[in-house]
Image: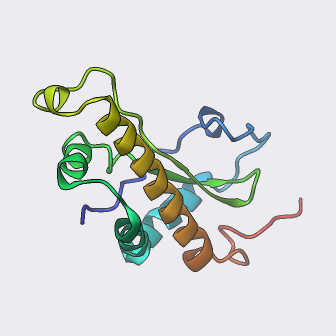
């Protein structure tokens, strides 16, 4: 199993297709740090195992996703607008480095992108349902 993705830098929520830009973003960095801790404490392992049990990727497709850095490029964030854990799955570039450009056809590439989306969704649900405490200071609702 690969290491969990690193959630180093805060992303602009407006960069995510399904997220409206909030007027104010408070506590975002703390939330990313908390999500990264949850991933390291077992959310990644739990979600990855759940995903692996249902994934149809073959070994070569999964190895390609790992070697191309796609698994590590998954991003998880707190979606303030919806009050849940969102994710961003990377897309496969059209021009891949060798040897993958010759080895992965269009179907392989589509399968990998779909599987990465499913991995992101699964880990996001694990984070949200088993790790995030909505009554905590970081993830609780604030009434300004």
Q: Is residue 14 visible?
A: yes
In terms of depth relative to the viewer, which is nearer, 68 or 60? 60
> Residue at point 73% right, 60% down?
83
The answer to which quarter of the image holds residue 15 is: top right
Split into 4 quadrants, where in the image is the N terminus?
A: bottom left
Relative to 70, does residue 103 appear above or below in the rendering? above
Residue extending farthest to the left is: 99
> Residue at point 73% right, 37% down?
21
> Residue at point 23% right, 39% down?
68
Side (left or right) of 113 relative to 80: left
Percent across and percent down for residue 4 are 34, 61
In terms of depth relative to the viewer, which is nearer, 84 or 98? 98
Q: Is residue 8 visible?
A: no
The answer to which quarter of the image holds residue 30 is: bottom right
Residue extending farthest to the right is: 144
Side (left or right) of 77 relative to 55: right
Relative to 61, does residue 94 appear above or below in the rendering? above
């Amino acid at each position: 199993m690969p290491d969990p993705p690193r959630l180093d830098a805060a992303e602009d929520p407006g960069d995510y297709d399904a997220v409206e830009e909030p007027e104010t973003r408070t506590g975002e960095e703390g939330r990313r740090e908390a999500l990264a801790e949850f991933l390291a404490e077992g959310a990644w392992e739990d979600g990855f195992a759940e995903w692996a049990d249902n994934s149809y990727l073959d070994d070569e497709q999964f190895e390609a996703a790992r070697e191309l850095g796609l698994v590590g490029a998954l991003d998880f964030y707190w979606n303030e607008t919806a009050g849940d854990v969102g994710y961003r799955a990377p897309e496969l570039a059209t021009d891949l480095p060798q040897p993958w450009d010759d080895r992965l056809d269009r179907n392989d590439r589509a399968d990998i992108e779909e599987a990465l989306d499913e991995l992101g969704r699964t880990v996001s649900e694990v984070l949200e349902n088993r790790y995030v405490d909505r009554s905590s200071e970081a993830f609780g609702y604030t009434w300004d």
